[in-house]
Image (cartoon, rainbow, N blue to C red):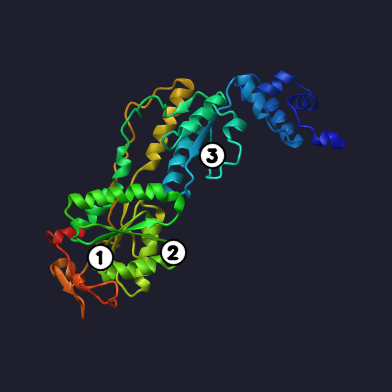
Amino acid sequence: MTDRDVRRRVTAADIAQSVGVSRATVGFVLNNTPGKTSETTRRRVLDEAARLGYRPHIAAQALARGSSRIVLFLLPDWPADFSMRQYLDEAAHVLDSAGYSLVTFKRHASDRARPLWESLDPEIVVSTMPWVPDTLTALRRAGITNIVPDPDSPVPHDVSAIAAGPRLQVEHLHALGHRRLAIASASDPRLAELSGQRARSAHDAAKRLGLGELDVRSVRYRDGSASQAVLDWHRHGVTGIVAYNDETAIAVIGAALRGGLTVPDDLAVIGHDDSPLAEMFVPSLSSVRIDTANVGRYVAHLVLHQADGRPAPVTGPDVKATVVPRESTLVTGPWCLGDRTRRSEGGRDPSDLTDDAPPGPPLVTRHYPDPASCDL
């Protein structure tokens, strides 16, 4: 075999010549067409294709069947957290079972790379965020008209429960007797918009419950911001933390423990997403669970409905947000069983503290409705 032969793409005709069968027979085998070849011939063709290093020509296949069977998911420029991975994994599974490939594309702030839809010729493009007019214009200019969700129609089913997490975090801490809360926000600037939305939802929930303004701090585990935030919160009598996600919550708990505080007695912390870390961490982390895998299945079925006319989902995804209570918020022991107010040794009322005052354990008062609240 010459160098030219090595560089040239192996074709179905090459396989047919090598095996001694027709080009049509090779096509039946490679396209997995049932009932057209014997098992012996099929095995010979596949073995020879593997030996020659045959790879299907994607563009040619798409041209032949009039479809690339590629579904392109446009992702926000966010870190790939547990919720997003769960969503994409389930969508990919549903699409794969129907013969479609899920490909993701993340547009960065610099936006210098050529859009992937211009290279792949996807059959459908799905956005995980509200459509941006510039993106829609670019897609239509590229001849892509299959778009999910349809920008000209409302979302078929209500998925607003996805935004309920911060409200549930605040309500959970309030039900456990916490009256001074704070928010541990994400430090990644790419998450500023989403983090701000969650903080506003938490503020609204706190206001409805008659709580004061929630102090918001961006924390991360590498730069000491979590330790400083925990110190300030403790000095000012904050006893409950609403964290942006589980990783942020764990950064806060780590800082609290290193600072000599106990969790949840001195500081209760609740995360968001209920990632595997929440259950593995010590103390285990209370968190908000949202079944994003169910959302992934739902979106995949919407895609299949638009792609080849399969039945559309009759109902929306079950995305009810729920609190999963664990050790990071659930107080145990005699205090939980009836001692509603605790003053640490040398403690002072938090209202006596100023920014210049040295740190000290404040008076901690919790308003438990009854001992059963400890089992929330």
Residue at label 2?
A: 221
Q: 61 or 262, which is in the foreground? A: 262
For the residues labelled 2 and 3, say whether their Cβ atoms are less than 8 Å apart: no
Can residue 151 be seen in this snapshot?
yes
Residue that label 3 marks: 105
| CB within 8 Å, label 1 to label 2 | no
Hey, what amino acid is under mark 2?
Answer: Tyr
The residue wearing badge 1 is 238
> Can you tell which quarter of the image residue 115 is in?
top right
As measured in the structure, the alpha-carbon distance from the residue carrying label 1 to the one carrying label 2 is: 20 Å
Toward the right, the furthest residue is 2
Mark 1 residue type: Val
Give percent across and percent down for residue 77. 49, 45
**Residue at point 35% right, 27% down?**
154
Residue pushed farthest bottom? 346
Q: Is residue 235 above or below residue 107?
A: below
Q: Earlier in the sequence, mark 1 or mark 2?
A: 2
> On the picture, is 166 further left or further right than 339?
right
Q: Position of residue 367 (x, y in %)?
A: 14, 62
- What separation in Å lies between label 2 and label 3 (alpha carbons)? 28 Å
Q: Which comes sooner in the sequence, label 3 or label 1?
A: 3
